[in-house]
Image (cartoon, grey):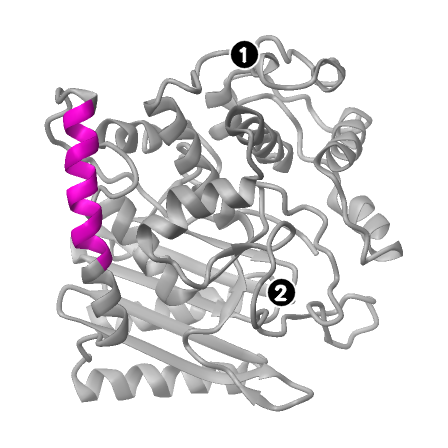
């Protein structure tokens, strides 16, 4: 499997007062949070419907794409100020012929980075983390010694992928994973492999500090830093600081938490024999899932996450959101702290297109249209083309031709 972040985002300029005292801001956030939890819970159970004609077009499109592209299944969730629509087509389990549900859980892939970045910014608000301090303040000495320029690399540079760490050649790593698919990797084991493999890639140009160069190692290191700073496992930190605040009942970190009821079957050509196989039962460990990937969630939970971050200020102060949206240049159009930018045909938006073991997804927020879109399929073969096409066609149906 190839992890490649494909982002469909662009910057949203947020303005507002930022001069309140910390105590006043915290009090205001508590009030907003209580209101938001009630609002989101009600919205999730009783979404306002789209007009029947629009809903029928969306369902016909979704069912048609699943059939014509021969996908196991697909989920589409659209939320606007005028209404919500959740649609589904296909199967959650091909062997058991279990129908897919719009509230089913799936692997988020690199959207996990948004969760990690939010936690880092919260810790910065509390003066626990200094985003511009060296990562050597938080990492074990033996690990710091393995990282080129570690004393010069800051937490912020890990967050926006300007640390200079290279992304290793992925196929060699996945051959190692295929040889022992149930192995439970520890962060330092994965990092040792990634750092050694990247350092040995003499045929690739080196990356330098302050230049964007995507690497899973950045967010694995951030996961370790969060655990060191809080004294708690990453899963527990994300749950207390994000999931519990937003009432996310279907959001978990796969390698660190029990997942009651599990999640749907994801499919891929794991053995490279031309046939799709389940890569979730028995569990095939995606190995990289330690802050860089690894989150499990549902489409309704992700809509709540976007609302909490962008609309309700339930997770971060406005000044922190501005930091999150401060971009460095990247091939895809700009990357912030755990989030990236690209224009869409319907205006600028925030979100990601990515694939991970067994799943592909689009998560998109279009502020100019007050629209949130979550689309996912339970296959990681054929890259992200099918789920991107589903998202594009759904936007055309509800927003018209750009």
The residue tagged 2 is 380
Q: Is residue 206 above or below residue 251?
A: above
- The answer to whether one can see residue 15 in this image is yes
Q: Secondary structure at mark 2?
A: loop
Residue 142 found in image quarter: top right
Q: Residue at x 49, y 37 (%)?
A: 331
In the displayed structure image, the side of residue 129 where residue 285 appears, left or right: right
In the displayed structure image, the side of residue 297 where residue 244 appears, left or right: left
Q: Residue at x 45, y 81 (%)?
A: 101
Residue 114 found in image quarter: top left
* Residue numbers of the magenta segment: 23-37
Looking at marks 1 and 2 on the same chain, the residue that comes earlier in the sequence is marked by 1
The residue tagged 1 is 134
Circle 1: is it few (<14), some (14-19), or many (20+) Cα within 10 Å? some
Name the dominant secondary structure of the magenta segment.
Answer: helix
Q: Residue at x 34, y 52 (%)?
A: 305
Q: Position of residue 148 (x, y in %)?
A: 69, 15
The reply to whether callout 1 and callout 2 are in contact (CB within 8 Å) is: no
Residue 221 found in image quarter: top right
Quadrant showing the N terminus = bottom right
The residue lying furthest to the right in this view is: 179
| Foreground residue among 359 and 262 | 262
Q: Position of residue 259 (x, y in %)?
A: 57, 63
Q: Nearer the viewer, mark 1 or mark 2?
A: 1
Task: Judge whether residue 93 is colored magenta.
Answer: no
The residue lying furthest to the top in this view is: 151
| Foreground residue among 6 and 143 | 143
In the displayed structure image, the side of residue 122 where residue 222 appears, left or right: right
Quadrant showing the C terminus = bottom left
């Amino acid at each position: 499997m190839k992890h490649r972040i494909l982002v469909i985002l662009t910057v949203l300029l947020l303005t507002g007062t930022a001069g309140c005292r910390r105590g006043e801001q915290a009090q205001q956030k508590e009030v907003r949070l209580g209101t938001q939890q009630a609002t989101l819970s009600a919205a999730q159970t009783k979404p306002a419907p789209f007009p029947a004609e629009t809903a029928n077009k969306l369902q016909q499109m979704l069912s048609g794409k699943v059939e014509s592209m021969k996908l196991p299944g697909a989920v589409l969730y659209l939320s606007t100020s005028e209404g919500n629509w959740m649609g589904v087509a296909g199967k959650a389990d091909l062997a058991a012929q279990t129908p897919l549900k719009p509230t089913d859980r799936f692997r988020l892939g690199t959207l996990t980075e948004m969760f990690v970045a939010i936690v880092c910014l919260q810790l910065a608000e509390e003066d626990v983390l200094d985003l511009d301090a060296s990562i050597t303040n938080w990492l074990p000495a033996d690990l710091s010694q393995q990282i080129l320029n570690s004393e010069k690399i800051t937490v912020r540079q890990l967050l926006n992928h300007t640390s200079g760490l290279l992304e290793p050649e992925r196929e060699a790593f996945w051959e190692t994973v295929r040889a022992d698919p149930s192995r439970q990797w520890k962060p330092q084991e994965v990092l040792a492999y990634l750092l050694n493999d990247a350092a040995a890639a003499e045929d690739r140009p080196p990356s330098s500090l302050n230049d964007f160069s995507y690497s899973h190692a950045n967010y694995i290191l951030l996961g370790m830093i969060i655990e060191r700073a809080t004294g708690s496992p990453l899963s527990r930190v994300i749950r207390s600081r994000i999931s519990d605040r937003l009432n996310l009942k279907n959001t978990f970190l796969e390698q660190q938490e029990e997942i009651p009821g599990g999640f749907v079957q994801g499919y891929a050509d794991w053995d490279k024999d031309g046939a799709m196989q389940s890569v979730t039962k028995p569990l095939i460990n995606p190995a990289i899932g330690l802050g860089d990937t690894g989150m499990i969630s549902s489409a309704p939970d992700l809509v709540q996450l976007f609302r909490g971050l962008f609309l309700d200020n339930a997770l971060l102060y406005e000044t922190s959101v501005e930091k999150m949206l401060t971009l460095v240049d990247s091939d895809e159009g700009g990357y912030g702290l755990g989030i990236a930018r690209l224009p869409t045909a319907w205006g600028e938006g925030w979100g990601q297109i990515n694939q991970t073991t067994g799943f592909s997804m689009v998560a998109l927020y279009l502020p100019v249209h007050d629209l949130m879109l979550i689309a996912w399929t339970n296959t990681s073969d054929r890259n992200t083309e099918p789920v991107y096409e589903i998202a594009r066609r759904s936007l055309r149906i509800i927003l018209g031709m750009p």
